[in-house]
Amino acid sequence: MQELNKTIKYSQRLGDVLRCLPAAKYLADKGNKVFFNCLAEYHGVFEMTSYVKAGHRQGDIIDLEIWPQKYEAYRKSRKTWTDFVYSHPEIKEADKTNIVLDKLGTDRIKGMPNNYNLVAPFGISQGHKRNPINIIVDARRQMGEDNFYVLTPPGVGINGLNCYTAQTIEDMAKVIRDADEFWTVNSSPVVLASAVRRGNETMFFGQKDEFEADNIFYFDGLIMAD
């Protein structure tokens, strides 16, 4: 079979880029050389994969991006994000929940204790907004104060609490993977959890009402908080 070049286009939002990885894996398994066209700040994703790398305009372009051109069609379809994106004819047979990070190292994050609990209450582009403080308070009450950490975006700190800001996307994946207990909203951390925490509990504060379609697909270990 002749190798063909394919480029998936999904330029922004880390969680969405990650959710497109099953499409890349599917195309690569069919013998294609696969590239991914996204913002440079997300190129760290491809340091964790052997089957796709960053690039653009390589061979056939498969444009999966919803915003802005397809956003209205997406909302009107009432499909989940996953079902809408994976309705594209070239990837509709892909295992759309199989996010494979086959180059993710097994080493743990330096400076973190052997046992810790983690909450990731921050997200962007949340239609149904959650109050991160309320989630932190509830998580700390249930998990306990010892070795309790908050996963924070760059430049965000919370006085009196242990905070961890990942310097790379790989570091974020590892710190989520190795947590004893993990709580999160519908953002990139829960997508990483679907790849690295299968079988381990992840407490999930999802989107609701008209934005429920944006939620991560179910994976083994996912528990709905409400």
Image (tube, rainbow, N blue to C red):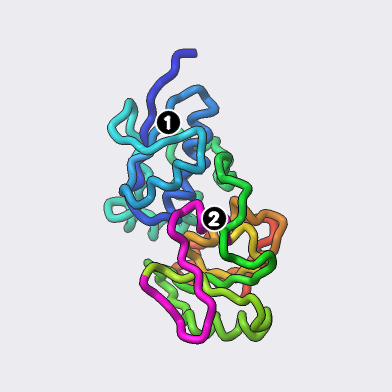
Instruction: Sort mark 1 into few (<14), some (14-19) or many (20+) by Cα contacts within 10 Å.
Output: many
Residue 217 showing in the rendered view: no
Q: Position of residue 180 (x, y in %)?
A: 69, 66
Q: Is residue 215 left or right of residue 124?
A: right
Residue 192 showing in the rendered view: yes
Between marks 1 and 2 in the image, the one whose residue lies nearer the viewer: 2
Residue at the location (39% across, 34% down)?
Answer: 35
Residue 143 sits above or below residue 199 on the image:
below
Instruction: Sort mark 2 into few (<14), some (14-19) or many (20+) by Cα contacts within 10 Å.
Output: many
The residue that label 1 is drawn on is: 34
Q: Position of residue 114 (x, y in %)?
A: 68, 64
Residue at the location (31% across, 55% down)?
Answer: 67
Residue at the location (34% across, 28% down)?
Answer: 60
Q: Position of residue 13 (x, y in %)?
A: 38, 56
Task: Tell me which segment is drawn in magenta.
Answer: 155-175
- Toward which corner of the image does residue 109 lie, by quadrant? bottom right
Q: How many marks?
A: 2
Q: Secondary structure at mark 1?
A: strand
Q: Position of residue 197 (x, y in %)?
A: 65, 56
Quick check: is 108 in the magenta stretch?
no
CA gap between label 1 and label 2 equals: 22 Å
Residue 35 sits above or below residue 210 on the image:
above
The residue that label 2 is drawn on is: 173
What amino acid does circle 2 point to?
Ala
